[in-house]
Image (tube, rainbow, N blue to C red):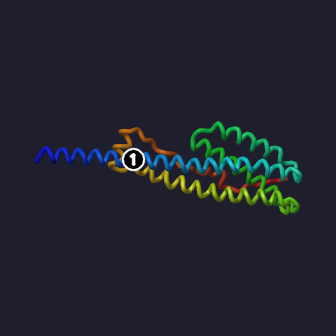
Amino acid sequence: MTPFIVIAIIVILVILVIATYNSLVSLRNQVKNSWSQIDVELQRRFDLIPNLVETVKGYTNHEEAVLTKVTELRTSWSDASTVSEKADLENELSGALKSIMAVAENYPDLKSNTNFLSLQEELANTENKLSNSRQSYNNITTVYNTKLEVFPSNIIANMFGFKQAELFNVSDESKQSVKVQF
C-alpha cells in the first residue's frame, strides 16, 4: 500500500506543477496581448496627431515646435522596448496633444473646421480605447504578478524563471493641465 501512496503523491505534485506552470504561461501571454493592444492604440494616436497638427497649422504659428516634438517622439517610439520607456513617451505625447487642443480652443474657426472635428473625434475614440487597454493591461498584469508571489505558484515561477511584468503608470506631469500662452 505504501508504494501506491508515494506514487499517488508524486502524480498529484506533477499535476500541480504542470497546472501551475500552464496557468503562469497563460497569464504571461495575456499580459503580452494586453500590452499589444496598448501598443496598437498608441501607434494609432502617433499616426493621428501629425494630421491634427497639419490642420491646426493654418491657424497658428506655434505648431512647428509641436510637430517637431511629435516627430521626435514617433522616432523614439520605434526604438523603445520596455513598458516604462513607452509609458514615458506616451506621457510626453499626451502633453503635446494637450498643447494642440489648448491652441485649438483659441481659434473658433478651427474648432468648427470639419477636418479638425473629424480628427478630434477619431483621437477621442482612440483615447477611450487606449484608456480601456491600459486598464485591462494593468488588471491582467496585477493578476499575473500576484500569481508570481503567492504560494505555491511562486515556487514554480522561480523554478522556471518567470519575471514580474511592469504596470503601465502615468507620470505626474501628464496628470496636470497644459498652459499655453501666446
For the residue pair 90 and 160, the one nearer the viewer reads as 160
Q: Which residue is mark 1?
A: 22
Up-down: is 146 above or below 69?
Answer: below
- Considering every residue shown, the one lying at the far left of the view is 1
- Left or right of residue 117: residue 139: left
Give how far across and how far down residue 120 sits, in percent: 76, 58
- Left or right of residue 151: residue 60: right
Amino acid found under the numbered disc labelled 1? Asn
Quadrant housing residue 162: top left
Residue located 34% across and 43% down the image: 155
What number of labels is visible? 1
Task: Tell me the SS state at disc 1.
Answer: helix
Give how far across and how far down residue 142 sits, in percent: 47, 53
Residue located 87% across and 51% down the image: 60
Give how far across and how far down residue 78 sits, in percent: 66, 38
- Left or right of residue 5: residue 97: right
Residue located 42% across and 51% down the image: 146
Quadrant housing residue 21: top left
Give how far across and how far down residue 53 sits, in percent: 80, 50
- Considering every residue shown, the one lying at the far top of the view is 79
Residue located 74% across and 52% down the image: 97
Q: Residues within 10 Å of mark 1 (few under 14, many from 20)?
A: few
- Left or right of residue 95: residue 80: left
